[in-house]
Amino acid sequence: MRKHTVSTAVTLGATVLLGAGGLGTASAAPGAPASPAVTDPAHRQPGQSVLVDCSMKSQVRPDTFVLACGDGNSRLVSLHWTKWTGRAATARGVNAVNDCKPYCAAGTFRSYPVVVRLEGPQPWKKDPQLRQFTRLSLVFPGARPQGYQRVVTYQLGDSAIVAPQRAG
């Protein structure tokens, strides 16, 4: 009888956890929404421009976006989009960056207000009917992470960030 009770409790606990939805990952920055606004394929329009995330999923107007796919130590959160067209998109939000002091696992996430700009749409190799933004720029109007320029531009590839571009 006891064995049946334990397995029932474990099954119920797993069901509650799986059904809870909205649980974040261990690398999620404090205050970050657990799941981004991923575009439903049924609502996409041919030629629409999208942002491709670390999981190779297309997004339109996401609430969050991970910049550091490998470790999650830099992400955009609380994004509020003021513009989203086929050619460009603009949002205000926060760049949550791990200071990695004394090392990343023990670091602290710091929040910096940021303006996000997406540009350079090109056909997406995974779904050529969609256009993916190929350039993401962050503009820090105030404080910014140590070592960052006021404007940081990233080249986006078929699976999120490829590399930051040097500001001129």
Image (spheres, rainbow, N blue to C red):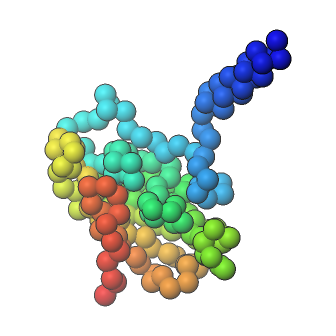
Residue 27 visible somewhere in the drawing: yes
Residue found at x 33% / y 71%: 163
Q: Is residue 6 left or right of residue 42?
A: right
The count of marks equals 0
Residue found at x 73% / y 18%: 8
Q: Is residue 56 above or below residue 114?
A: above
Rendered image quadrant of residue 122: bottom left
Outermost residue toward the right?
A: 2
Residue 104: x %, y % from top left? 60, 72
Residue found at x 61% / y 30%: 18
Residue 80 visible somewhere in the drawing: no
Residue 121: x %, y % from top left? 22, 56
Residue 145: x %, y % from top left? 55, 79
Q: Is residue 69 left or right of residue 13?
A: left
Quadrant assignment for the C terminus: bottom left
Residue found at x 82% / y 12%: 1
In the image shown, does 124 or 139 lie closer to the viewer? Answer: 124
Rendered image quadrant of residue 20: top right
In the image shown, does 5 or 148 lie closer to the viewer? Answer: 5
Q: Is residue 119 above or below residue 50?
A: below
In the image shown, does 17 or 137 lie closer to the viewer? Answer: 17
Residue 117: x %, y % from top left? 37, 64
Outermost residue toward the top?
A: 1
Q: Is residue 100 left or right of residue 139?
A: right
Q: Is residue 14 above or below residue 84?
A: above
Q: Is residue 149 above or below residue 112?
A: below
